[in-house]
Image (cartoon, coloured by chain):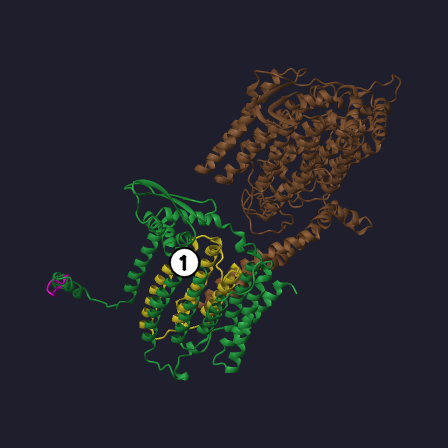
Chain colours: A yellow, B green, C brown
Amino acid sequence: MAELVVPEVFGQLALGHYLVLSAFLFAIGLAGFVTRRNMIVMFLCTELMFQAAVIALAAFGRFHLDLSGQVMVIFVLTIAAAEAALALGLVVLLFKRQPTLDAEAWSEMRDA
Amino acid sequence: MPPASVIHAFTVLAAGALLLLLRPSPTIRLRLLGAVVGIGAFTGIIAQLPAFYDGQVMPGGTFFLPFALISVISAVQMITTSRPVYAALHFVLVVLASSGLLVTLGAEFLGFAVVIVYAGAILITYMFVLMLAQQAQSPDLEDERPNYDRFAREPLGGAVVAFLLLAFMNHLIFTGTGGLTPGDVDPIPARLAAWQRVGAMPGRAMELVEEVPGCREAWLPEGEELLLVPDPDGLAATVTVMIGEVSTPVRLEGELARQAIEDNIRSVGVALIEAFPVSLELAGVILTMAMFGAVILARRQIELTEDEKREASGLPRIGHHDDPKTEGVDHG
Amino acid sequence: MIGSQLLSLLVAAGDAAHSADHGHHSVHFPVGVPTEGLGYAGLVLALPLIAMILNGVYAISGVRSKLPAWTTVACLGGAFAVVLNLYLKADIEHPVVVPLFEWINLSWGTGSISAPFGLYLDSLTLLWMLFVTGLGTMIALYASEYMESDVGPAYCRFFGGVSIFLLAMGCLVMGDNLLTLYLGWEGVGFASYMLIGYHFTKPSAVAAAKKAFIVNRIGDLGLALGIYLTWMHFGTLEYAKLFEMLQVDGAVAAAQQAMSGGWEVSIIPFLLMAGAFGKSAQLPFYVWLPDAMEGPTPVSALIHAATMVTAGVYLLVRTFPMLELHPAAAPTVAWVGGATALLAATIGMAQYDIKRVMAYSTVSQLGYMFMGVGVLSTFGAAAHVFTHAFFKAVLFLTCGAIMHGFAGQLDLRVLRGLRHVKGWRIVVWTMFYASLCLAGFPIISSGYWSKDVILAEAFANGRPLLGGLGLLTAGMTAYYTFRVWFRVCCGPKPDDHDLAKMMGDDHHGEDHHDEGHSEDDQHHHHMPHAPKWAVNLVLSVISVAAVGSIFLVPEHGWLEHMVAKSSGAAGVGANHHELPADAGFWADPHGWMKYVASTVGLIGIAIAAWLHLLNRSAADRLRATLLASPLKVVVRAMENKWYVDELYNALIRMPLKIKGHALHMIDRYLLDILVVDGLGRLPKMIGRTLSPLQNGVLQSYAASMAGGVILIALLILVLPMLLDLIGGVA
């Protein structure tokens, strides 16, 4: 049953490996969200950040030998799906009003 | 040089690489440079990890590094390409790679679920919307692509913010989670919990029992609890079943035991139902509401006049003869 | 070491005093004991309180009649009646304490302070209250006519102020502890402030009120500290207990008290003195009193001549046993009094405003009283307070009548011949008699009797220089008093045109008396009007009282008896010197002073008569001559009140003003602009700097969020590091 705890091929991996990867993906997603102007790509970037969270959650669950991590991932998937549905609905709505996907086109909605 | 500074130096390098790649229409040479530096920085940080785990583990794993590199490279491609459709496709790659990583983490179910939900469902929706929005534009001609796709917005600020956050997270990973090596976690409670889950599924347990030689006729009396007693180390368990008319203890061990407690889909399902029933319901509600929301947001907005609404609901139109305004004038 | 030296010094001083002063320290006086059944004495305080409340009600309900005046007169008259009743019932040998109610009773860990609100009824209290309530009633009656042009809210305010004054004066005089005295002390200060500033629309009146209030504050600080130290050392503020402690064995007991308490105890008399000097307008605080004449004349007569200003004398007589706590205390009082008397007299000689002359004469006479206390003659001081209250009230009230009749005219160079004008007879002759009293005319004037006691005691006490100063002052007093009377009342008979020219430029009834009224004022041709019955009645009654006081003040008389049984007892026995049978005429100052003082007074009157009655132009010629001579500096200085106000201005007000301006500048430019505005501008600047962040672009909001996370992370990471670093260094 030793394989259960540390599978043979990945035996030498530590939690840190997955967390570093997760952190990289999250940072790249954030950078993308901040720098891209296309609304759809921005939402893709949020999905990327979700992916980073998924990896981190799964890794934590794995290394604590607790299935809650995986359950959380299921919820993350749920939220991601709901978010995608609503966000894309909004994009469509906005695109109908102003035929552009540029996020800055909507900057006059600010409170000033 | 203290390792923490090395980590931060690599983080800065990675940020520089991303900055290079975020430039509008960079030359191939610069892209290559950026890619090499970025990949170098990432693998550099990964290579630092064993030192932080006191040499308990060796660096690398057969599948981790490839999947990790694929996901990182694809992610960078995704945020640097000027073509939104390519970005979506790169994201599919990220999802696929992370699905592989999930499998390496023993989360097979999630690995497939992620591919199905993300790559299959969500990304297709994104594609639809992208196509819808960009149908008028030719994707081939660089100049015809809109500026908001071609030029990154404040790349420096974005890179700085994102990589400061990355530096912070790395710092925590390298200082705050040092103790979380696999060896530090006692696996026995996890195995016992897994046996408990098996005990909660009498059907599954009986399936396993039937695999044991000589137990094909085992049965469970109607309305009785399954008696499953795991060994103290959790590596095997004894199930008490009826064989014929005799109550017999059956040992589940070896390969059978591994099958019993490593059954990922069943385990996750039981954990989900057992530990988070309300959250599960809430997730369902959220999904339903999101569906309604999406439908309402996306439907065509039509302004109907009062008469049109009355007509639509089967009521007679309001005529001019009973206009109170004209009556008032008459009497005045 | 120092303590023992001080003790021996004090004891030596006490012995010296014993031999020189014929053992007056060992005089014992009865101490008040609590008693039942005299609770109605509280009416003396309650009646003015009722009057005050009623006046407030009248003011609110818009009464426009003389009702406030009659109410006040009735209440004050009632208070006088109660005091009289108390006097008739009282056994002077056995003072009583009438507890009214629990006022302050605090106790904590190791200490306690209690000040029951009670009345200490001994002969001194009764003496003071008799003339305070009596004069209060009469002057309220006078004011009912004097203030009649103000009928309405201001009338109510005036009589409300008078009622407050009487209430506070009652507390001050009748209270059975120093805290109640202090309550009354501040109360009369407030009433004085309120009434000086009665014409609150007039800047000079407001300034005078402020001046009086602020100068009094300085003295009151001394009094407060004195009371505090008394409580610290003796543990009680009640007279009865204090007197018990202090009169165990005269000076030795006091010296022992001083010894055991150190310097804090020996400065108690000086602190009390400061309070007394402030309230009674002595050097260096006297400057407020002349300005206080901005108030209506009845106020000047009642508060600033007859009663309130004698509170300082009362305080010193009441706490006379405490003067023994330091050997230099009594001489200080004496010298301050003498110097004030002389200084004020010299100023009074050179003033043209008759009310101001009276004000300076008040300061001067108060100086006599303090001299009396200082030369250990509480009897003389109290006697002079008593006689002075009546004749100075008359003088002020006659000045007020003239001012009232002549629309604010107070310049003695303008007024003349009032004697010949119809309807002014009572004013002229009561003024004449009061002037005789002030001048110390022999035998028939009350001032003669009381002043002589003080002057003689100064010589008897081995202070001939002080006595000589007093005599000089007495001569000056006689001169300036009669200068006023001769100028105003005598001279050629004025015809109607002259009278019209004499009219002041005031609106009728207003107490306006700025110096320098133009003599050729042609705008007011209305005629002066003579006083009516209330003024004449009051003048007559008080004058009769002044005559009556002649019979009360001589030695071994009623007043001495009253003082001898009070806390001022130690200052009475000194009058009964045992002289050797073969002593010459000059051995007993009380003997020869009668003649010398009379002579000096008569000389003063004669000079005044020469310069201002017989040869009315001689005064101006003399002034011109003096101004041409080297003495002109002195004359100018006297006319300008020795430049004391200017000196205070330069020494105290200007530095304070400069400091105030400097602090104001610091406040305005350093604190307000740099700190306050700076603090205000900081968020504004930050806001302006950060407002571009609120640009409506989604990505920048996301970046800000991430930045916030980073900041928090840095805080979490860096703070422990810094703390470690600090801990490592430490």
Secondary structure mainly formed by the magenta segment: loop
Q: What stretch is highlighted in magenta?
A: B317-325
Residue drawn 29% across the image and 41% down it:
B221
Q: How many labels does the image show?
A: 1
Dot 1: within a 10 Å radius of its alpha carbon, few (fewer than 14), some, or many (20 or more) residues?
Answer: many
Residue B73 part of the magenta segment: no
Q: Which residue lies furthest to the front in this view?
A: B214
Residue B319 part of the magenta segment: yes
Residue drawn 30% across the image and 65% down it:
B297
Q: Residue C211: percent from the left, percent from the top?
A: 64, 44
Work out which quarter of the rendered image holds the N terminus of chain C and state it.
Answer: top right
Q: In this view, does C728 lie above or below C408?
A: below
Disc 1 designates what residue?
A73
**Image quarter for residue C121?**
top right
Query: Between C114 and C54, which is closer to the camera in this rendering?
Result: C114
Q: Mark 1 lies on which chain?
A: A
Query: Between B318 and C56, which is closer to the camera in this rendering?
Result: B318
Q: Residue C703: percent from the left, percent from the top?
A: 48, 66
**Image quarter for residue B3?**
bottom right
Query: Between C548 and C295, which is closer to the camera in this rendering?
Result: C295
Query: Between B317 and C349, which is closer to the camera in this rendering?
Result: B317
Q: In this view, does C657 lie above or below B119?
A: above
Residue drawn 62% across the image and 51% down it:
C520
Q: In this view, does B25 lie to the left or right of A80?
A: right
- Residue B27 visible? The answer is no
Q: Residue furthest left?
A: B321
- Residue C82 visible? The answer is yes
Report helix, strand or loop for mark 1.
helix
Callout 1 amino acid: Val
Q: Residue B92: percent from the left, percent from the top?
A: 40, 70
Q: Residue B211: percent from the left, percent from the top?
A: 35, 52
